[in-house]
């Protein structure tokens, strides 16, 4: 009789412990879902910010292009009128604008790459988040059924899978994205070519006032 009482007490303790663990697993899962939702919203904001920045860069490039066209026309007219002083002033401004135009184009390329990566991350996270929510609903149904003694529910596999998913999401949205973005933004393409050009080896890598005048003079002569 005493042995049966001990066995009964052990069974009751096991049942109580299993119930606490199961309830805590659902609470933990709910918090992980909230954390995942916050991370996705952060990624969506980052994507929207990048897209807005891209639009601003498009407007900037359009303004530069329009101003370049107007200045080149004025510079040709000044050269045709033998006003090289004014043409030189325009040429200096044109050279600077052409450098700005190239910088704007490079910025657009970088932003486009960043937008594509962010869009992939957001789409993948949204898909996984939807699967996580479906899993949560299934777990809720299973928990209710287990409480009704209709079926037994083992939440260990689900809990392990959600832990793995949370680790993948954290690593992808925090570490990999930050490192790749920093590498792209700190890259300095063309540095070797520019140093060689400055030493007199090869064509210049960026426009100068002299090169702009050399390009515009034949056009001005043909108009005069």
Image: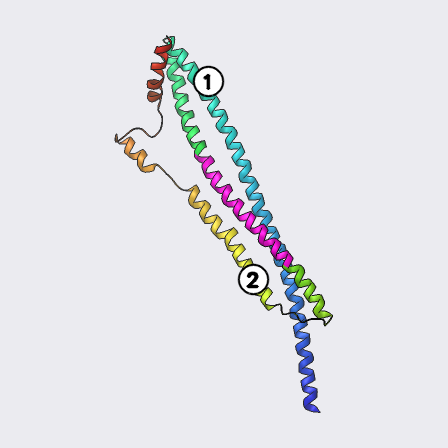
Q: What kind of colouring is applied to the model shown?
A: rainbow
Give yes or no for residue 125 being in the magenta stretch: yes
Q: Position of residue 47 (x, y in %)?
A: 55, 42
Residue at the image position 44 percent from the left and 28 percent from the top: 101
In three-dimensional space, the C-alpha distance between marks 2 and 1, rounded to whole angstroms, equals 60 Å
Which dot marks residue 70? 1
67 up-or-down from 48: above or below = above
142 up-or-down from 56: above or below = below
Q: Earlier in the sequence, mark 2 or mark 1?
A: 1
Q: Quadrant of the N terminus?
A: bottom right
Q: Residues within 10 Å of mark 1 (few under 14, many from 20)?
A: few
Give the magenta-colored segment's residue range: 106-134
Task: Name the residue beneath numbered marker 2.
Answer: 163
Predominant SS of the magenta segment: helix
Q: Position of residue 166 (x, y in %)?
A: 56, 58
Please tell me in which quadrant of the rendered image residue 165 appears.
bottom right
Residue at the image position 52 percent from the left and 45 percent from the top: 118
Q: Position of residue 167 (x, y in %)?
A: 53, 58
Q: Quadrant of the C terminus?
A: top left
Q: Nearer the viewer, residue 185 or 220?
A: 220
């Amino acid at each position: 009789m005493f042995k049966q009482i001990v066995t009964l007490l052990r069974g009751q303790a096991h049942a109580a412990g299993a119930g606490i663990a199961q309830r805590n697993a659902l609470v933990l899962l709910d918090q992980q879902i909230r954390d995942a939702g916050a991370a996705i919203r952060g990624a969506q904001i980052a994507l929207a910010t990048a897209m807005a920045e891209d639009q601003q860069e498009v407007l900037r490039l359009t303004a530069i292009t329009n101003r370049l066209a107007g200045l080149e026309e004025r510079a040709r007219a000044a050269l045709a009128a033998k006003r090289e002083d004014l043409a030189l002033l325009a040429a200096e401004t044109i050279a600077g604008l052409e450098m700005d135009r190239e910088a704007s184009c490079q910025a657009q390329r970088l932003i486009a790459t960043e937008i594509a990566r962010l869009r992939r991350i957001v789409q993948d996270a949204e898909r996984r988040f939807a699967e996580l929510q479906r899993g949560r609903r299934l777990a809720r149904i299973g928990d209710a059924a287990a409480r009704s003694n209709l079926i037994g529910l083992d939440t260990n596999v689900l809990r392990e899978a959600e832990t793995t998913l949370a680790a993948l999401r954290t690593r992808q949205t925090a570490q990999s994205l930050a490192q790749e973005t920093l590498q792209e933004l700190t890259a300095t393409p063309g540095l070797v070519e520019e140093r060689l050009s400055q030493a007199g080896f090869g064509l210049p890598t960026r426009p100068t006032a002299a090169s702009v005048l050399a390009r515009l003079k034949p056009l001005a002569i043909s108009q005069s």
